[in-house]
Amino acid sequence: MQKGVIIAASAIVAVVVVVAVVAVVCGIPAVSMSNSASAGADNGNAGADAGKVSGESVKTNAADEGKSTESTVRAGDAGGEITVEEGKESVLKFIGDDSLKLSDIKFANEVDYFSQGDYYQYNVDGGNGIGKVAAYVSKDNGNVEMISFYDKRSDGEKEKAITLDQAKENAWRYIADKYPEFVKMNTVEIDSEYNDHMAGGKDYIFTWRESVDGVQTLNIVTLAVDAVNGEILSYMALNRDYTGTMTPKLSEDEAYAKAIEAFPGIEVTEKSCTLSVEYVEKGRPALSYTVTLKGKPVNYTSYGGIVLIDAETGEIMLKSGYN
């Protein structure tokens, strides 16, 4: 994926759609969860340990500094769709800045093409001490699930002043304030990278996802942290209940076999498989295998891709080939 350019990742799973949208809204590179989930699985316990160490540190520091432990994320059914005005109130509470008034938050649009649900979009035009903001509020639960702070990004000519570890600490502090339940979860680090966007500034992108008995759940957080001033530039978080099975009927070997069938004649050189809960269609999460295959080039062209397979039925839900 090219750095410094906003490119929507292939929508192979619902989380990919979420993060691709965050990339467009927040001005950060899209993160392909299918690819990065595999990377997270490869990192294994190292990623989980790193995430938990940071999380424990944040919990301690937040308590010492007297930060609020009240969650701004309301999980579960809110009893029907919220109203536009209730969404505004959610944005006001989430930002939590005394300089912001309810009248500063403008309803912009209804967004109803995400697999994980429908949203209200709100904009803040600046002139209130916090600058320009774009926020997406779930119609179902009233949570601010995506937000971007446009004016917090440093100028591109400024040198990097924040280390990756410092940026990660800032990210976990923000999570502890906005989504304290996530700090208590067993998480795996899916993505952790530095990006230089030239004139567009410099940032770190982090993604963590809950893991239960080796299965990645719907609960996920992605943040962008400015590499110059350490400010949070964007935040995406899901806190979703899942009541379906966590035990696959299909084995990993069977998932590999089905994925290979999807690419006739492929000579596999690299492969990875992640078991996770994904939105296979709008509003319907299911236990799934995300299989990534890389094969020998065919006619000097890369051959392979990503396949999403229902772990109960064995049905191929989505396929995305490399170009």
Image (cartoon, grey):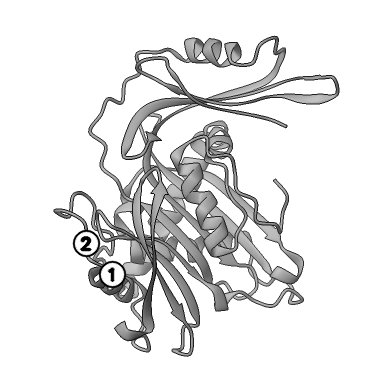
Name the residue type under label 1: Ser
Q: Is 18 situated above or below 229?
A: above
| Quadrant where the C terminus is found in the figure | top right
Q: Earlier in the sequence, mark 1 or mark 2?
A: 2
Q: Quadrant of residue 272?
A: top right
In-image side of 309 versus 65 (left or right)? right
What residue is pinned by disc 1? 90
Secondary structure at numbered mark 2: loop
Residue at 56% x, 56% y is 23
Dot 1 crowding, Cα within 10 Å, few <14, some 14–19, many 20+: many
Name the residue type under label 2: Ile
| Quadrant where the N terminus is found in the figure | top right
What residue is pinned by disc 2? 82
User: Nearest the camera: 268 or 183?
Assistant: 268
Secondary structure at numbered mark 1: helix
Image mark for residue 246: none
Residue at 56% x, 77% y is 152
Question: Is there CB contact under 8 Å for labels 1 and 2?
Answer: yes
Residue at 69% x, 30% y is 322
Find residue 309 and report its horizontal and vertical position in percent.
Answer: 46, 22
Closest to the camera, between mark 1 and mark 2, is 2
Q: Quadrant of residue 247?
A: top left
Find residue 219 and report its horizontal and vertical position in percent.
Answer: 36, 45
In-image side of 261 versus 78 (left or right)? right
Q: Is 153 situated above or below 277?
A: below
Per the model, the C-alpha gap separating discs 1 and 2 is: 10 Å
In-image side of 33 versus 71 (left or right)? right
Find residue 179 and report its horizontal and vertical position in percent.
Answer: 33, 59
Dot 2 crowding, Cα within 10 Å, few <14, some 14–19, many 20+: some
Find residue 244 and report its horizontal and vertical position in percent.
Answer: 25, 29
